[in-house]
Amino acid sequence: MSSGKVLVTGANGFIAAWVVRSLLEEGFSVRGTVRSEAKCAHLRKQFASYGDRLELVIVPDIIKAGAFDEAVKGVDAIEHMASPFYLNAVEPDELIVPAILGTVGILESARQYGTSVKRIVVTSSCAAVLQTAPEPRTLNEDSWNEQAPKEVEQLGRGANATTMYRASKTLAERAAWDFVNTHKSEIGWDLVVINPPYVFGPTIHEVPTADALGTSARQFYTMLTAPSEPAARHSGYCWADVRDVGRAHVLALLKASAGGERIIISNGAFVWQEWRE
C-alpha cells in the first residue's frame, strides 16, 4: 500500500499520535478512534495542516461487541494501537480482558465489515517476547514470553503488576495470530505485529501536566527528575524512539514483505543512569 485511508485506534495515545503523524506525512488519510469528543480537540489542532485527511470517530468502549464495526468500513488498512498500559493493576483481568477483547474485536469487525482492508498492523510489545533466565540469551521474533501467562495463571492477583501487563501483551498477540489462522479462508487481509520495548521520545499527544504522561514517559521523567538516587537508575532494559516506532508502522504498510511477520523494533539497550548523564 502507498495510499488510502488507515484506521488508527486509540489515536490520542503516545505512540498512536506519532503513527497518525507518520501516516499523514506519507500521504495517507487517517481515521482515528478516541474514547470521547473531549479527546478530539488537541488532535484536530495538532494536525490541522493536513485538513480533511484526518477524521476522528468516537469508540467509547473497545471491549464492547461490535465496537469497531462502523469504524472499519471504508478503510484500506488498520493500525490497532488501543490497549491498556499501566503497571499498578490489582487484578490481572484489568489488563488482560481489554487487551484480548479489543484486539480480537477489531479483527472480527474487519472480518465482517472491513471489505476494503488489505492489511492490519497490531502493536504488541517486547513484553510478549522477553524471557528471564539466569544466563544472558539472544531473543528474536521467534521468542515468546511463556513465563508471564503461567505466573498469572498460578498466582492470580498475587502476581507482580508488571507480570500482569506482560501476560496481557502475550495473550493478546497470541489471540491475534490465532484469529488469523482460524479465519484465513474468510479474510482478505494479512497481519503484521510490531513489538517495541520501552518507547521514549517527544510527546505530541495531549499532556497538560507531568502526571498525565504515559507509563514509559513518566518513568523516564521520574528517573531524570527524582532528587534522590534510586537503585533503579542502575538497572536497564531495551528502548525504541517513538518516532522510529511511528515510522515502522508506516513501513509495515508500504512493504509487501512485512505481511505475516512479527517485527521487533529496538534502538538497543540502556541503563537509566546513562539517560541521566
Image (cartoon, rainbow, N blue to C red):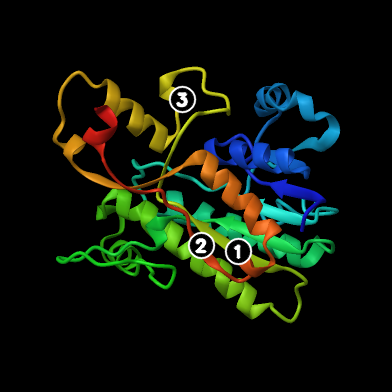
User: Residue 228's x, y, as percent?
Assistant: 16, 22
Q: Report the amino acid beneath label 3.
A: Ala
How many neighbours does mark 2 have within 10 angstroms: few (below 14), some (14-19), or many (20 or more)?
many
Residue 123 in sight in this render = yes
Q: Is residue 59 above or below residue 218?
A: below
Front disc: 3 or 1? 1
Q: Which residue, given by chain and number where applicable, does mark 3 sit on? A: 212
Residue at figure coordinates x 71%, y 63% from the top left: 119
User: Along the polypeptide, which appears first: circle 2 or circle 1?
Assistant: 1
Front disc: 3 or 2? 2
User: Residue 202's x, y, as percent?
Assistant: 49, 29
Q: Is residue 271 above or below residue 264?
A: above
Mark 2 touches mark 1? (CB < 8 Å):
yes
> SS class of the residue under badge 3?
helix
Q: Which residue, given by chain and number where applicable, does mark 1 sit on? A: 192
Q: Report the amino acid beneath label 2.
A: Ile
Residue at figure coordinates x 53%, y 46% from the top left: 245
Mark 3 touches mark 2? (CB < 8 Å):
no
> SS class of the residue under badge 1?
strand
Quarter of the image with the C terminus is top left
Residue at figure coordinates x 72%, y 52% from the top left: 68
How many neighbours does mark 3 have within 10 angstroms: few (below 14), some (14-19), or many (20 or more)?
few
The answer to whether residue 74 is left or right of residue 180 is: right
Real-space Cα separation, disc 2 to disc 1, in angstroms: 8 Å
The answer to whether residue 123 is left or right of residue 60 is: left
Real-space Cα separation, disc 3 to disc 2, in angstroms: 29 Å
User: Residue 237's x, y, as percent?
Assistant: 29, 48
Real-space Cα separation, disc 3 to disc 1, in angstroms: 30 Å
Q: Report the amino acid beneath label 1.
A: Val
Q: Which residue, given by chain and number where applicable, does mark 2 sit on? A: 263
Task: Give the camera-side residue of 71 and 266.
Answer: 266
Count numbered badges in the picture.
3
